[in-house]
Amino acid sequence: MASFEKLESNKVKLGMTISAEDFDKAVDKAYLKLRKTITVPGFRKGHAPKGVIEKAYGWYVFVDDAFDEAYPAVYEAAVKEHDVKPVDRPDITILSAEKGEDVAFEAVVTVMPEVSLGQYKGIEVEKQEYNVTDEMVNAEIERERENVARMIDVERPVENGDEVELDYFGTVDGVKFEGGTAEHQTLVIGSGMFIPGFEEQMIGMNVGEEKDLNVKFPDEYHSEELKGKDAVFHVKVHAVRVKELPEADDEFAKDVSEFNTIAELRDHKKEELEKKAMNEAKAKKENDVIEKAVANATVDIPDVMIDRQADRMLNDIRYRLSMQGISLEDYCKYTGTKTEVMKAEMKNEAERRVKTQLVLDAIMKAEGIKAENDEVEKKIDEYCAQFDDKAEEFKAKLNEDDKAYFEDQVLLDKTINMLVDSAIEK
């Protein structure tokens, strides 16, 4: 039997003993490990008997390694006995260790904090209204027109909004500079892609015309050699093009969709917008309810939980950057920051996430919410469906940890649905 004492700051103390018999067995294992490193006169290294090593160095030479071998099983049994939920490694202290006697030790460990729930049922939230207008549908149709628009050549002077094909080379004090030359470059006039003054001075030019443009590089320009410098760009226009949009008619609808008429396409776009708006309203309501339920609860969160959540968030950024071929270290160099600073800036959000999870878990327990087998299977099937013909193959490879993840998702969904269903819209 292990003793149990509740301490301050979400810590508990467990008092335990390792039987003399079990510790002797651990000492034998420690001997097999240590004899390879201990030198005893008259014996080849690694061949000195246990008794000889003990006589030469004392029984205590085996204690540390024997303890490391024996204590985990005893500690885990004590954790299970008192239903302790550690959130950090235990701080172990050996109280007594004598040859032939039980070994006494204690472990101080930070545990999952207790949550004091406030109101979480019948929470008042603002009613989420959504209205899909004709203007919103028109905007969707315009986006489709833009997607299939084509550029056509025109024989007239350059105007704002035109796409121009040009050659150019730039000089500073009559000398060309690196990166200042291009041939058959395309540029949309008015896009602001070139330095100030460049695009504006091209307005009015004709195809085949050449011209010198006088500009000044911005003081905050990325190149140290060019920032703030006056420059001249010699440009030649090869083509002037404008965007031609298709008419929003039945033929257009057939080209861009499975529908035969523009009216059907508009109805479809409206349905999509309504579904999106409905989902956004649902998500907003869920977030509002959860946020208020969490705010109404009280919990003293151990620093280690916040720190580990911040680490997970930082690792998530590291992973996303790696998908773009960028390391977190290089990102820090580019942005002039440090990982420690990034992590520190995440602490508030990390604390919010930890508290939210703790409160939802506490509500789940208070309401006795369970995940039924058929609900878990349905959740797994929904996820596996995305793999189409390989869905069953993927499902067959799921292990117990994977299934536990889907069970957690079912529990979370049911908890949130309960909160939302009980909420009062004002």
Image (cartoon, helix red, strand yellow):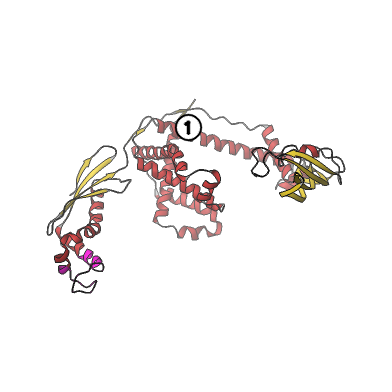
Q: Nearer the viewer, residue 283 or 417?
A: 283
- Tell me: 38 left or right of 402: left
* Residue positioned most to the top: 426
Q: Quadrant of residue 277?
A: top right
Question: Which residue lies under the disc numbered 1?
Answer: 288
- Tell me: 124 left or right of 171: left
Task: Tell me which segment is drawn in magenta.
Answer: 28-52
| Label 1 neighbour load within 10 Å: few <14, some 14-19, many 20+ | some
The picture places residue 184, in percent across and down from the top left corner, at 78, 51
Decide whether residue 246 is among the magenta residues.
no
Q: Is residue 420 visible?
A: yes
By secondary structure, the bulk of the magenta-drawn segment is best described as: loop
Q: Residue at x 39, y 37 (%)?
A: 355
Decide whether residue 29 is among the magenta residues.
yes
Does residue 73 sit above or below 168 in this rendering? below
Does residue 400 sit above or below 263 in this rendering? below
Q: Give the residue type at disc 1.
A: Asp
The picture places residue 426, in percent across and down from the top left corner, at 49, 25
Q: Nearer the viewer, residue 423 or 184?
A: 184
As helix, strand or loop, the secondary structure at mark 1 comes to helix
